[in-house]
Amino acid sequence: MLHKALLVARREFTENLRTRTFWIGILALPVALVFSIGIQVLFFRARDARHYAVVDHSGWLSEAVEARAGAKDLERVLAAAVRAERMPGGAKAFPEPVRALGAELAVAFPAAPATPSLPTATTRDPQAAREAALTLGLDPRLSKLLPLLGARAFGLHAEDSQLEAALGSAEAATRISALLPALAAWYRDLSADQASELGLELARGRFVRSHADGDVEAELARAVASGRLFAYFVVPADPAGSLEPVRYASKNLTDGDLRSWFSDLADDAVRDRRLEQRQISPEVAAWVQQSLAFESRKVGEGGEIEEVATADRARQWAPMAFTYLLWFAVFLVANMLLTSTIEEKSNRIMEVLLSSVSPVELLTGKILGIAASGLTMISAWLSFFLGVAWLVPLLFSFKLPVNLSVVAGDPRLLGSFVIYFVLGYLLYAALLAAIGSVCNTLREAQNLMTPITLLLMVPIFGMVPISQDPNGSLARALSYFPPFTPFVMMNRAAGPPSWLEYVVTTVLLALAAALALWGGAKIFRVGILATGKPPRLGEILRWLRAPVGQVRLEQSPEQKGQP
Amino acid sequence: MTSPALYLEGVTKRFGSTLAVDHLSLSIPRGTLYGFLGQNGAGKTTTLRMVMSILYPDEGRLSVLGSEQPEAVKDRLGYLPEERGLYKKMKVGSMVAYFGRLKGLSAGEAKSRARQLLATYGLGDWVNAPCEALSKGMAQKAQILATLLHEPELVILDEPFSGLDPVNVEAMRQLILEMKRQGRTVIFSTHMMEQAEKLCDGIVLIHRGKKLIDGPLAQVRASAGRGILLDYDGDGSFLRTLPGVARVNDAGKQAEIFLADGVDPQTILAAVVGRLRVRRFDLSEPSLHEIFVRAVGGEQHVA
């Protein structure tokens, strides 16, 4: 009995491995992922520099913006130079003034990067998150120093005392300060093309200011219309003292990169000017603007208050990822079963098989063999992701925000994943095998599949609300409906649900799977021999009510004792 | 060899309200070549499926190779259904071996037998080709070899000749005869009487789920009385109007003429000679076609 089922399973598996679709399927996900990320990066890199002009009635704002943009660019360049110095043998060919300062800084801060401060999901300020990402991998003291160096190179506000504090000594401060003019000079002569070649996404490479002749607005408008300019700004006479707006004019208002870049920098400049006018020191202003800090604590089941560590973040994040994976796995593998059943039917191969194996053996073998193929595919994807998660930090000295060992070590995650996959797959496999058995073509099957596809969408739509409130009444209620149980319970793992809920829902799910297999097998054994139009629901129900195998000869008592 | 290869007693199968097989009783001795004859939908396939335990009878007894549990002897049977397909992408060799394995052969044995058998029947070069590359005739051959790999004692072929061209019909005939020579019992169903006539040791005629005639072919034909077989050129439409003629099966160039009791065939010959160009005039047993038409009451024609 089992021997024949295993033969069927083995054929399903080995033949699946031989198909091109299988390998395309295995490669498709990673390739699509790499491709979509790569395309975005390429688009970003390949974007032409935006030319803009400024009609500056204030006489100072545009220069202030350029100085600030330069300071930020230098900060980026220096960060990259220091990182390059620290790489074993990997000092990129930076131009001399940059390399010299980078080397100096690398000596001054020899410490390997400590745990980097990471942009957390709670960071409300996107600017801060971007800055944090920029200096990733540099220790906090260096991250503080670099903006100062950039500012000083452009003659912006940067006290000697701050520099000394950041560098540790007055002597170091003078030595490093002495290198700054050369750096500023290098930057002044840097062309947009050279800047893009550095690959650091410098503002110099992305936005180029054209000094329009005459600065007459009508002329600029014509330049924008003809495409020579991307946009122009008109700065009012007293931006710091009035509420008069800066005008931004462009043909393309959907691409807001230039506008937001300019307005951020101009905002900073205007704010500094206002502080200066009211004689408020920047330190006081910074302190006033400092937002109130919040930190999260998790209250455990016993009422203990725990700090939220990265491990917990993994625990919050993992259920969603696992739910997706589970859903995808169940859907994909059950669909493979449907396709293979229909293939055998439409290839008229069923009856040959049935002369050697019983329908139940056939169904068992198919369910096992296809599960093996599907799991192979999913493991390939998982190994790809884990490989990337392991390789990327190694190659780019970047640390993942989550600790994977926490995920691997939590039995509630991995254990329940395996159990839910097995039970969920059996449930849906039985349904789809039954559907496949009564259809002759994939198109017929698609119609019958619709209710099941709709059913499967519910856990996907519920994913975010459920993970936000894993023990809420919606999440609880859905857990007890067996077709949703695997996904919803997986999704709630961060809650986590009580053990009682785990046991009750799993028992319900197992019963439902058993029932589905029983019914599925009955439909399967009749359906696989049926040809022509798919039967109506009433007819299928009649198959379900019929006793298994109808009258089995060996079971009729009056025949016992006959030769 | 005491028990018959196949024994049916009052076997009945219903599908909903239709009676597909109606109290069918039958005994087929071992080592014989037996034909299941009947029109499409007569119940031949349903009966064969019950023998293969793909379907189960609602009533009656069924014993295959002496076993009352047909499932237990499944591995000793070979079955070629009418709807026969191949796994398109699978290699011919592996597919034939796979069906052998499902019948209980070991992996190595199935593989070596498959190679050997395919080579014997001229498919040696196709062992590693995908099944979809085979022509229809070759596919047919591969299918039947797959049912023979495990050397079954009883081979059941459902409409083995349907959809084959004359060359492949002949090849199939040779294969069937060879199976018989090897001592296997072969049962095949067909609605083509000429094939059955040429091959069978015995026949069973099924009409609307009921058995009409059953027995060794010679006996069946002998009991039907003799008739005239006439090969001719010309217009034979007058034949059925001749005095003393009971029935005529006129095919245009050949006619079977059956006479009323006591009529001398010589009178017919005399009447025909002047009006037709006679190429053959033969006194013979009736064809299966005639027997079939008579049995079902002449109200239906056979394809």
Image: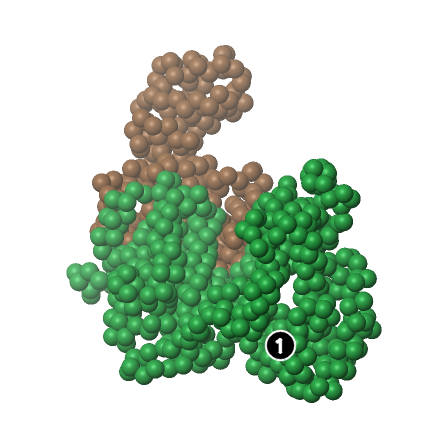
Chain colours: A green, B brown
Query: Residue B50: x, y in percent?
Result: 32, 52
Horizontal side of A237 relative to A353 (left or right) equals: right
Location of residue A273 (image quadrant): bottom right
Q: Residue at x 28, y 53 (%)?
A: B56
Give A244 or A561, whichever is nearer the viewer: A244
Location of residue A184 (image quadrant): bottom right
Q: Residue at x 56, y 65 (%)?
A: A278
Residue A138 seen from this side: no
Give A235 or A315, whichever is nearer the viewer: A235
Horizontal side of B292 relative to A183 (left or right) equals: left
Give A545 or A145, whichever is nearer the viewer: A145
| Chain at tag 1 | A
Q: Residue at x 60, y 59 (%)?
A: A270
Question: How many dots with numbers?
Answer: 1
Name the residue tied to disc 1. Answer: A144
Residue A220 seen from this side: yes
Q: Quadrant of the C terminus of chain B?
A: top left
Q: Residue at x 38, y 14 (%)?
A: B242
Query: Residue A142: x, y in percent?
Result: 65, 79
Residue B186 higher or lower than B281, as above or below: below
Q: Residues within 10 Å of mark 1 (few under 14, many from 20)?
A: some
* Secondary structure state at the residue bearing disc 1: helix
Query: Residue A73: x, y in percent?
Result: 70, 65
Horizontal side of B250 relative to A39 (left or right) equals: left
Query: Residue A331: x, y in percent?
Result: 42, 58
Q: Name the kind of residue labelled 1 in the image.
A: Lys
The extreme front residue here reads A278
